[in-house]
């Protein structure tokens, strides 16, 4: 395969197909080198053409709660109490910078999602 920039949908699809065929390439082989290059090209193309917006802060918190299997009450210490958690998750109150730092530190909620 000739390596070239991905400029359109056809190039993108061809690169993805090639990636599928060499996905299990052994390390330090020509195929694994090609795989690394194609993945980088595909990522660059997708970032430019398929930019996905970060989730809103509330959705990010709820998603993380689901991932960790935690309840609203588990967030109380980080957010200033049970009532405050309820107000935040129901959109009645805004997150403060302190809450964002605590949620990121204690529950690893991505900071960029909390700041969105």
Image (spheres, rainbow, N blue to C red):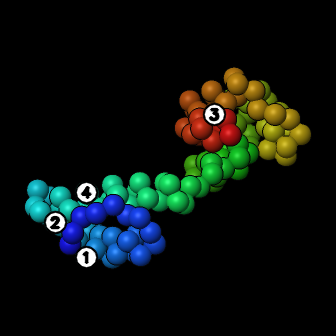
The residue where tag 2 is placed is 31
Q: Is residue 2 left or right of residue 107?
A: left
Q: Where is 68 relative to 93, above or below?
A: below
Q: Residues within 10 Å of mark 4 (few under 14, many from 20)?
A: few
Q: Quadrant of the C terminus?
A: top right
Q: Nearer the viewer, residue 34 or 62?
A: 34
- Which class describes the residues within 10 Å of circle 1: few (<14), some (14-19), or many (20+)? few
Question: Is residue 63 something one can see in this rendering?
Answer: yes
Q: Which residue is tagged 4? A: 36
- Residue located at (70% from left, 25% from top): 97
Labelled pair 2, 3 in contact (Cβ < 8 Å): no
Q: Tell me the CA gap for discs 1 and 4.
A: 13 Å
Residue at which label 1 appears: 21
**Does label 1 or label 3 sit earlier along the sequence?**
1
Give the secondary structure at mark 4.
helix
Q: Please give the residue where the numbered disc 3 appears in the rendered image.
A: 103
Select label 2 or label 3 by which is in front: 2
Q: CA distance from mark 4 to mark 2?
A: 9 Å
Q: Position of residue 63 (x, y in %)?
A: 64, 52
Q: Residue 103: x percent and y percent?
A: 63, 33
In the rendered structure, which disc, 2 or 3, sits on the residue that comes first in sequence? 2
Q: CA distance from mark 1 to mark 3?
A: 41 Å
Residue drawn where x is 85% and y is 43% of the image: 91
Report the disc number at residue 54.
none
Q: Is residue 10 left or right of residue 49?
A: left
The reply to whether dot 1 and dot 3 touch (C-beta < 8 Å) is no
Vertical position of residue 98 compared to residue 64: above or below: above
Q: In terms of sequence position, does the residue under pointer 1 or pointer 4 come before the other?
A: 1
> Residue 51 in the image: x percent, y percent?
56, 55
């Amino acid at each position: 395969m000739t390596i070239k920039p991905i400029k359109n949908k056809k190039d993108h699809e061809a690169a993805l197909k090639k990636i599928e065929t060499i996905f299990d390439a052994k390390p330090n082989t020509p195929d694994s080198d090609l795989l690394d290059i194609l993945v980088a090209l595909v990522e660059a193309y997708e970032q430019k053409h398929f930019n996905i917006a970060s989730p809103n802060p509330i959705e990010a918190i709820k998603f993380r709660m689901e991932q960790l299997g935690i309840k609203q009450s588990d967030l109380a210490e980080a957010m200033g109490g049970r009532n405050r958690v309820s107000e935040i998750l129901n959109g009645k109150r805004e997150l403060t910078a302190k809450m964002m730092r605590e949620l990121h530190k204690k529950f690893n909620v991505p900071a960029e999602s909390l700041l969105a």
